Amino acid sequence: MEDKTKKCLYCAEDIKEDATKCKHCGSNLLLEEKNKKIKAKNHESYNTFTLLSFLLPCVGIVIGIIYLSKKNPLDKKLGEHAIASSILAFILWGVLFSFFIGNVEKQFISTQTTSTIMDDIYKKVSMDSVEQYRIAERQGDKIQICVQAGFVAAAYLQEQNESSYQEWKDIEQKDCAKAGLY
Ligand SMILES: [Zn+2]
């Protein structure tokens, strides 16, 4: 059976796969293997902590503080990293949130502005229709007066001016009666 080989990390000579010590240069390979595993695990932890801190910065801060109080310098570094990520995340979320709130506010204001403009337009239409009614009145065509009074009432209905609508409904009725339409 042939033994599997690997290259020594220190001298690049071929050595047995499960060798713990290089027969060429005498380096301790077990230590290297252990360091590699620690590094890989540490890298994984960094990724996890970064993700967690960005999604839940409050949790990230708490975990960061816990790790910062540990004795192991690697854990301390991890704690620092979690806290830094969390602070960055807080800023990022704050910017996103204020941007979102700002947009909602802007939309609300623009909706309000639009409805104010529409109100003004309806008022103008009502005023114009009253003006047209006055013209019809001066010209004395009874059917035209009756029709125009109906337009005024419709304009006030559109404006949602209930009292004026009621008032002009009555005027319309009287004018149309005079014109012999009711
Ligand atoms: Zn070696």
Image (spheres, rainbow, N blue to C red):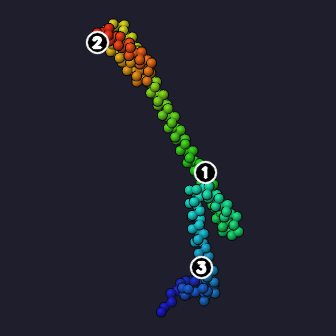
Question: Element type at marker 2?
Answer: loop
Q: Position of residue 124 (x, y in %)?
A: 43, 20
Q: Earlier in the sequence, mark 1 or mark 2?
A: 1
Mark 3 belongs to which amino acid? Glu
- Say if residue 150 shows up in the picture: yes
Residue identified by numbered label 1: 91
Number of numbered discs visible in the structure rendering: 3
Residue identified by numbered label 3: 33
Of discs 3 and 2, which sits in the foreground? 2
Whether residue 174 is situated above or below residue 83 in the rendered picture? above
Q: Is mark 3 within 8 Å of ligand 1?
A: no
Residue plotted at (58% across, 81% down): 9
Q: Mark on residue 181?
A: 2
Whether residue 27 is situated above or below residue 178 in the rendered picture? below
Query: Alpha carbon of mark 3 to alpha carbon of mark 1: how far?
Result: 40 Å
Query: Alpha carbon of mark 3 to alpha carbon of mark 2: how far?
Result: 105 Å
Q: Residues within 10 Å of mark 3 (few under 14, many from 20)?
A: few
Query: Alpha carbon of mark 1 to alpha carbon of mark 2: how far?
Result: 73 Å
Q: Are marks 3 and 2 in contact (CB under 8 Å)?
A: no
Whether residue 20 is situated above or below residue 62 in the rendered picture? below
Q: Is residue 144 left or right of residue 94?
A: left
Mark 2 belongs to which amino acid? Leu
Q: Earlier in the sequence, mark 3 or mark 1?
A: 3
Tell me where residue 127 sits by quadrant.
Answer: top left
